């Protein structure tokens, strides 16, 4: 059974700092890995999708890496802003396109 | 392109009552998913449809939960009777094919259910 763990559970940083969120998964037989953002009371917004054959994906200030063999992914956020405050969820796609989510990292960017 | 639509956004019911949620996926998406997200946890898949057929309902509590996707488009999720532990956000998602390493799921805003 696939298990996804995210560390840390919560993080508070001052505006402008670069930060890294971590995700690990137990079964390396995945099709892809997605990072999502969830604002309070809202649904999930997909940030980045990394296919199993890829090592990283970039979108603006976000960079996600994937090391499938070791079961790890990181989400790097450059020059953080208060608008980045949200919960960030990592999810892996296994057989039959089933997504397994981590419990998320709650990020607070302070002024 | 319109996103995934869900209604209602919020619902408060008493235990043992019934409730139904509605989802309209992105046009042309063959695969539809219902997730349950309990406060402080990641979403958990309840049921996955491919067109109007069920692909995976292994984590759906079938004694009280039911779902259908008539005509392979809209879907409804029903809980009858509700229990306190059903309080959660119910998320609907859709994807184009439901397979392959580039298949991306798009989520609706969710329905927040409170059972008192």
Image (tube, rainbow, N blue to C red):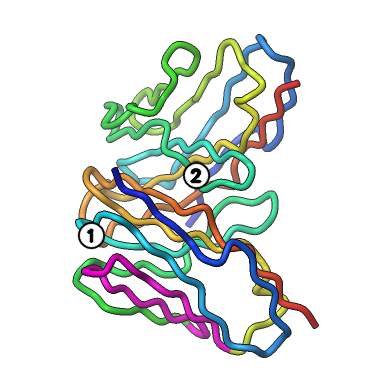
Q: Quick one: A54 or A46, which is closer to the camera? A: A54
Chain letter of the residue beneath label 1 in the structure image:
A
In this picture, is B6 found above or below B18?
Answer: below
A65 within the magenta span = yes
Marks 2 and 1, how far apart at CA? 20 Å
Of all residues, the one furthest to the right in this rendering is A111
**Residue A100 place in picture, x, y as percent:** 38, 48
In this picture, is B53 found above or below B5?
Answer: above
**Residue B49 place in picture, x, y as percent:** 32, 33
Q: Quick one: A54 or B97, which is closer to the camera? A: A54
- Secondary element type, mark 1: loop
Q: Which of label 2 and label 1 is nearer to you?
A: 1
- How dense is the environment of label 2, judged by Cα within 10 Å: few (below 14), some, or many (20 and up)? many
B36 within the magenta span = no
| Residue A45 in the figure: left or right of residue A16 | left
Residue at image mark 1: A28
Chain letter of the residue beneath label 2 in the structure image:
B
- How dense is the environment of label 1, judged by Cα within 10 Å: few (below 14), some, or many (20 and up)? some
Magenta residues (range): A60-78
Q: Residue at x 66, y 36 (%)?
A: B112
In this picture, is A87 found above or below B15?
Answer: below
User: Are dots 2 and 1 in contact, CB under 8 Å?
Assistant: no
Q: Which mark is residue B43?
A: 2
């Amino acid at each position: 059974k696939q298990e996804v763990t995210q560390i840390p559970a919560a993080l508070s940083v001052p505006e402008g700092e670069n930060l890294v969120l971590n995700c690990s998964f137990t079964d390396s037989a995945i099709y892809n890995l997605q990072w999502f953002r969830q604002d309070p009371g809202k649904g999930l917004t997909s940030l980045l999708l990394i296919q199993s054959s890829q090592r990283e994906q970039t979108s603006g200030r976000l960079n996600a890496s994937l090391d499938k063999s070791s079961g790890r992914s990181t989400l790097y956020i450059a020059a953080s802003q208060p608008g980045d405050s949200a919960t960030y969820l990592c999810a892996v796609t296994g057989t039959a396109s089933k997504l397994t989510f981590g419990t998320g990292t709650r990020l607070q960017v302070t002024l | 392109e319109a996103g995934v639509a869900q209604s209602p956004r919020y619902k408060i019911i008493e235990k043992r009552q019934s409730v139904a949620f509605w989802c309209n996926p992105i046009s042309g998406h063959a695969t539809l998913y219902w997730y349950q997200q309990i406060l402080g946890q990641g979403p958990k898949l309840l049921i996955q449809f491919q067109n109007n057929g069920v692909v995976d309902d292994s984590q759906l509590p079938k004694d009280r939960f039911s779902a259908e996707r008539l005509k392979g488009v809209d879907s409804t999720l029903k809980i009858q009777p509700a229990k306190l532990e059903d309080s959660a956000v119910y998320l609907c998602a859709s994807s184009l094919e439901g397979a392959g390493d580039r298949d991306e799921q798009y989520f609706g805003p969710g329905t927040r259910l409170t059972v008192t």
